[in-house]
Image (tube, rainbow, N blue to C red):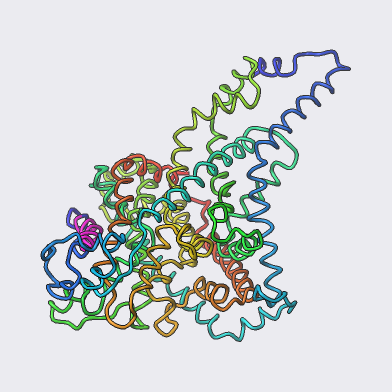
Amino acid sequence: MWGVLGVFIFITLFPLWWVLRTALTAPKLVYFNTNTLLPVQPTMVNFLRVTGLLDPKTAMEISGSQFSINFLLAFRNTVLFAGVITLFQVLFSATAAYAFARLDFPLRNFIFSLYISALMVPAVVTLIPNFILMRSLGWVGTMQGMWAPYILMTPFAVFFLRQFFLGINRELEDAAKIDGAGIFSTFWRIILPISQAPMATLAVITFIFYWNEYLWPLVIGGGVVQTRVMTVALGIFRSQNPSQGAPDWSGLMAAAVLAIIPALVLLVSMGRRLLDSIRFTGIK
Amino acid sequence: MQITTEVISPAPPSRFRSKWLKRLFREETIVAWIFIFPSLVGFITFYAVPAVRGLMVSFTDWDMLTPAKYVGLGNYVRMLHDADFWNALKVTSLFVLWNISIQTVLALLLGVIMSRLAKSNLVRSILLLPWLLSNVVVALLWMWLLDPTLGIVNVAIELLGMKSVAFLGLPQTAIPTLAIITIWRYLGYTGLLIFAGMQTIDLTLYEAAEVDGAGEWDMFWRITLPLMRPILTFVMVTSIIGSFQIFDIVAITTKGGPINATKVFNWLIYEQAFQRFNMGYAAALSVVLFLILIVVSFAQMRLFRANVVD
C-alpha cells in the first residue's frame, strides 16, 4: 500500500521537478544530457528571457528566440480578473441564496428552478451569444467584458450557498427578529458571520476556477496585451514558437514555472482550508 | 415556536389582521427582490437570453460582418452530413471513455489509500497540486515530457530498449494521451472527493464484517462500493459532463490534430466560430452538445439509480 502511495506521489511531483530542471537549463544545452536528474549548469537566463528582462538581441543569441511574456502585466490581469469576479459573485450569490432559503416571495421556487436548470447548460452554449453581446457593447478587449458574464452570479454559487443557508438554525434569526432587527440587519450581522466557512470555501474554489480560465479570457481579452491573463499569455507564447525546428523548451518551461508559483503559494498558505473545502463539496 | 408567532403577528383585532399580513408580506417581498436583483440581472442577461439567442442564431447563417440570413434547420442538416461533426462525436466520446474509466479506478484506489495511510494533510496537499494548475500549464508541461526526441518519458523508454513514441503526434495515441494528461490533473481532486465520501460510511459496518471473517477485498466490494454509489455517481456524472467539454489542453497541444484525431466537440465549435466565423453553425453545434449532455446525464442517473443505496 505504501508503495502505491509512493508511486502516486512520484507521478505527481516528478513532472513538476522536471519542469523546474528544464527551466534552469541553458537553452542550447537542452538538447544534450536529456536524462540527467539535475540541471546541467543551472542558470536563471531563461527566466530573464521569458519575462522580457533580457534585450532581444542577447536573447536571440542565447536561444534562437526573442519572444517573451509580459509576466507582471499578465499576473496583474489575472488577479484583477479572478479577484473582482470572486468578490462580487460571492456577495451577490449570497444575497440571492439567502432570499431563496429564508424569504418568501412570489415566483421564488420558479426562479430558483430556472437557476438550477442553467447548471446543466454547457459553457459553450452561452459563450457565443455572450461574445456577440460583448462585441455589440464594444467590450471586447476590456476588463469589464471579461468580468461581465460571471460577476453577478453563477447558478452553482447560488445553489451551493442556498443549501447551506437552509441548514442554519432558524432560532438565530427569530431571536434577531424579536430584538427588532430587519431582514437586512439579520443577514448582515448574523447570517454572514456564521457562514464564513462555506463562503470562504466558495470564494477559494471560485478564485482558482477563474485564475485558470482560458477560453473566455482568450476570446474577449486575448487580442490586447492590456487584458491578457496568464493562461492566455502562456498560450500565445507557446504559439509564437517557430514551427520548424524545436520549440523554445527552456523558455516554455521557465514560463510554466512562473505560472506554477502562485499555485504553490496558494497551496502552502491555504492547503488545509482547500482540503476541507473539497471534502465539503463532496459531502454536499 | 408559539412565541415566534406571537411576536411576528401579535394578536390584533381581526379587522386589522389582513392589513398586518399584507404589510409584512410586502416588506419581505421587496427585500427579497432586492436581494435577488443582481443575480437575476446576471441570470437573464448572461444565461437565459444567451441560451435563447444561441438557439435563434443556430437557425441562421451569420459571419458577424454581413447581416444574418435565416436558414431554418439548415445548420442541423449540414451537421448530419459533416464528417467533422461525426468525427468530433467519436473522438470526444473516446476521450470520455478513456478518461472516466481509468480515472474512476485510480481515484477509488487513491481514496482507499487516503483513508488508510495518507492521514497527513501534507501528502494530501501534494496530491492536490496538479488540480491547482491551469490546463494550459499542465498541457505545456506534458508536451515537454512527452516530446518524441527530448522528452524524459521517451528518453526513459529508449533507455529501456524500446522505441520512442510520438504520444501526441500519432493519431492512434493522441486521444488516450490527452486522457492520461487529464487524469493526472484531476486525480488528486477526484480521489479527495471519493475519500470524503468514504468517511461517511459507518465504521461499525466494517467491524461487523471483520468479525464475520470478511477479507479486505470482500469488504471493499460488498460494503464500500455499494454505499459509495451516490458519491460515485456524483463524481462520475460531473466528470463526464466536464470531459465532454475538453478544450484547453487541445488548444495548447494538438489543436485538433494530428489529422483531426483530437478535433473534439468544443474545438470544432471554437474553430467554426472564431476561425471560420460560421456563427450560425457553431451555435447549432453547441445546441447539439447541450442535448447530448442532457441525454448522457439522464441515462447515467437512471443507470446508477443515484438515489437508491441498497
Give the residue drawn at x 62%, y 36%: A101
Query: How far from the left and from the top, in percent, is residue A270?
Result: 33, 41
Q: Nearer the viewer, residue A41 or B3?
A: A41
Up/down of A28 relative to A276, above or below: below
Residue B76 or residue A266, whichever sits in front: A266
**Where residue B123 sits in the image (x, y, percent)?**
24, 47
Residue reaching furthest to the right: B15
Residue at point 71% right, 75% down? Answer: B60
| Residue B207 rendering spot, x and y as whole percentages | 29, 41
Tell me where the magenta segment starts and ends, as one range: A6-20
- Is B114 placed left or right of A199 in the picture? left
Camera sees residue B219: no
Nearest the eye: A70 or B99: A70
Q: Answer whether residue A19 is magenta in the image.
A: yes
Q: Residue at x 60, y 35 (%)?
A: A98
Residue B297 appears in the rendering: yes
| Residue B259 picture location, percent across and down | 42, 85
Q: Quadrant of the N terminus of chain B?
A: top right
